[in-house]
Image (tube, helix red, strand yellow):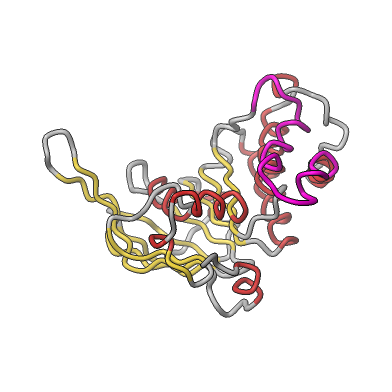
Amino acid sequence: MFPDLAGAAAAQEQPFVRLRDITRTVRLPDNSELHILGGIDLDVRRGDHLSIVGRSGSGKSTLLNILGMLDLPTTGSIEFGGVPVETMGGNQRAVLRGAAVGFIFQQFNLLAERTALENVMTPLLYAKGSAFWRREKLAAEMLERVGLGNRLREKPQRLSGGEQQRVAIARALVRGPRLILADEPTGALDIVTGQSVMGLLADVAAESGAALITITHDPNVAALAHSHYLLENGHLRPGAVAAA
């Protein structure tokens, strides 16, 4: 059974992503165990904007990988559209991830020899139906939406850091994901550009009704979210965030 994300997301009171008692443990070379996450619960609804703050090594990226179905928890359950992710095969998770989750990282991860338009078109090469055949038009429209309509044919080296991150945002959003995961999205940008990029990301996510989760150590970025969480010693709890 494939999860009906559209139906689940339409009912805002019902979370379409649900984490329950998530743990993540890895075995080290000396055969000891490292406990990264312990007993995490989280509900994500359509239109949510959450920030998760934590120090380096607190498990933020591990949690993001689990939310994005790049990794599975050691114990606990994560559900998309009411269907437990652990019951899906690897191919099914990959298809769902490609269709429903957009990733934005600190390093822009753009293809150096491809233009901005070609970079944004890349996810649509795996789309089906009209999205595949209309990929160039959809990519151009998304770049226009993030303010780069006049930079379609430029390669990354001819773009500023803020422009490259805007291309990365357009690439993450071009398939209309239900969930956007941003991992330190402003870490490679100066403060002013970072604030501008985050404001843009939040606005575009809100317009599309997608949920946005920002993983960061920057209180200024975290403060832009509607709900705030602190990840500490592998445990997640609500916490107030004040901009510096």
Q: Position of residue 24 (x, y in %)?
A: 29, 53
Q: Position of residue 15 (x, y in %)?
A: 53, 73
Q: In this image, 115 relative to 93: left or right?
A: right
Q: Dominant secondary structure of the magenta stretch?
A: helix
Q: Residue at x 62, y 76 (%)?
A: 12
Q: Would you identify the image quadrant in which residue 19 lies?
A: bottom left
Q: Residue at x 36, y 65 (%)?
A: 77
Q: Residue furthest right?
A: 150
Q: Position of residue 178 (x, y in %)?
A: 62, 60
Q: Position of residue 164 (x, y in %)?
A: 69, 31
| Label tally | 0
Residue 62 drawn above or below residue 78: above
Please tell me which residue lies in front, 162 or 46: 46
Please tell me which residue lies in front, 70 or 32: 70
Q: Which residues are magenta?
A: 111-137
Please tell me which residue lies in front, 51 or 18: 18
Q: Residue at x 72, y 24 (%)?
A: 114
Q: Residue at x 54, y 56 (%)?
A: 213
Magenta run includes residue 141? no
Q: In this image, 185 relative to 112: left or right?
A: left
Residue 79 drawn above or below residue 69: below
